[in-house]
Amino acid sequence: MFSLFGFAGQHIYNALDVRQGSPIALKDARPRDVSPMTTTRSDQIPSASTNPNESLDQPIWRRVLNSQWSPMKVLSDEEYEKMLRQKLLRADAEIAILEDDIAEAKAKLDADKRS
């Protein structure tokens, strides 16, 4: 039963991959020459895009993580730093709002004590 799910899942993934024009699908669709004498670096298929992250020379785990179908993504240092700065900015904004709320509550409490 699990074999059938795996088989169906793989074929669905392959169909979606071909539909998106993935470099992995292009590599599998190309006829292969089994002669070791004619296999050179120039025989490899270039990536469909100019993005170096999608290069066929990268490990499979990196290609899977960079796939548009993956819920995860490999972040560069700059992207990670930008994400952390945005989170810090949100936290600072929330702190400022809470400080304003505290100041209003203290002012209201002082006004109630005076009256």
Image (cartoon, rainbow, N blue to C red):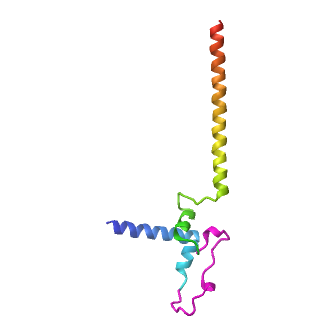
The count of marks equals: 0
* Looking at the image, residue 90 lies above or below residue 114: below
The reply to whether the magenta stretch includes residue 38 is yes
Percent across and percent down for residue 84 are: 63, 48
Percent across and percent down for residue 35 are: 52, 92
* Looking at the image, residue 16 lies above or below residue 34: above
Q: Nearer the viewer, residue 6 or 73?
A: 73
The quadrant the C terminus occupies is top right
Q: At x 63% / y 44%, what residue is drawn?
A: 87
Dominant SS in magenta: loop
Q: At x 61% / y 84%, what residue is drawn?
A: 41
Q: At x 35% / y 69%, what residue is drawn?
A: 3
- Quadrant in which residue 111 is drawn: top right
Q: At x 56% / y 68%, what residue is drawn?
A: 63
Percent across and percent down for residue 113 are: 63, 9
Percent across and percent down for residue 43 are: 61, 85
The segment highlighted magenta reads 32-56
Task: Decide if residue 70 is on the left or right side of residue 51.
Answer: left
The reply to whether the magenta stretch includes residue 48 is yes
Q: Nearer the viewer, residue 30 or 64?
A: 64
Task: Decide if residue 57 is on the left or right side of residue 10.
Answer: right
The quadrant the N terminus occupies is bottom left
- Quadrant in which residue 11 is drawn: bottom left
* Residue farthest to the left, as pictured: 1
* Residue farthest to the top, as pictured: 115
* Looking at the image, residue 81 lies above or below residue 12: above
